[in-house]
Image (tube, rainbow, N blue to C red):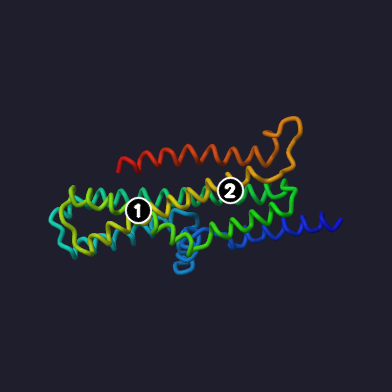
Amino acid sequence: MSETADLLTLRAELKRKLADGTYDPLAERVVKRVRRIFPRLLHGDIAPFVFLVFVNTSISYLLNLYDSVANFREWLFPAFSAFVLFWFAIFTCLRFQRHLYRVLSGYVIDAMTQPQDIQDLSRWLKRFSNSAVTLFFTFLFLAAIMPYQYPLQVAAHGAMGITTTISLSSGFVLLCLMEYQLITIMALIALLSRYCMELYEVDPNMSPATRNLSRVIRDYVYLLTRLACSIWHT
């Protein structure tokens, strides 16, 4: 009886943390912060998306203008397109993670039968959503790709000053943040396969937990694959 009560308590606690924002990823925290600062924004993700793209593009524009880049006008459309694409990829990953959290709360956690598995999942969600960890790996990825990307950009657009370099780096920060989000989502899905769950005996694939999880993964993997192809060609 005590073990059952502990299991129910752990399930309820994990669901509460998923619902109250304890395990929100960095992108979700940014969206909520934008909404607190500008409460009149329309509901949904489109308004914060448009706002962040506008701010990001405006700052990039001013930085490049300050640097007096010779072929600055040729940068405008590619830079704007890249910022839109990168922010859209971040918001797509964010929606993917939200849907995963809903499936966890609605189906997967109730199917988990071992208290230690629920505790382990809670620990990993805390690590994945930690803002300091997110920023650390984002800038680690940035440090890994910039020595390769910067010479390519210089070869394509000419020498860059410090402000133009900052503008360029801001776009790649978005790309690296999206990559971190995607890696943690994939890691979360891999973690779920290690846990003991109560599934249908005759056809485990028809169990609510596996059926809903596979549906979310299938839909978003297709969309993210299309996005990755688009980013590769930018």
| Mark 1 burial class by Cα count in 10 Å: few <14, some 14-19, many 20+ | few
Left or right for 169, reference 219? left
Which comes sooner in the sequence, label 1 or label 2?
A: 2
Which image quarter holds the N terminus?
A: bottom right
Q: Find residue 121 and report its horizontal and vertical position in percent.
A: 64, 54
Identify which residue is drawn at 53% across, 48% down: 185
* Element assignment for label 2: helix
Left or right for 10, reference 148? right
Query: What is the distance, in whole Å, between disc 1 and disc 2 at their CAs?
Result: 29 Å
Q: Which mark is residue 100?
A: 2
Left or right for 57, reference 29? left
Q: Find residue 25 and report its horizontal and vertical position in percent.
A: 52, 58
Q: Which residue is denoted by mark 1 in the rendering?
A: 144
Looking at numbered disc 2 in the image, what kind of residue is underneath it? Leu
* Element assignment for label 1: helix
Identify which residue is drawn at 49% across, 63% down: 131
Toward the bottom, the furthest residue is 37
The residue lying toward the viewer, choosing from 216 and 192, is 192
The residue lying toward the viewer, choosing from 34 and 136, is 136
Residue 140 sits in quarter:
bottom left
Q: Find residue 181 and report its horizontal and vertical position in percent.
A: 47, 52
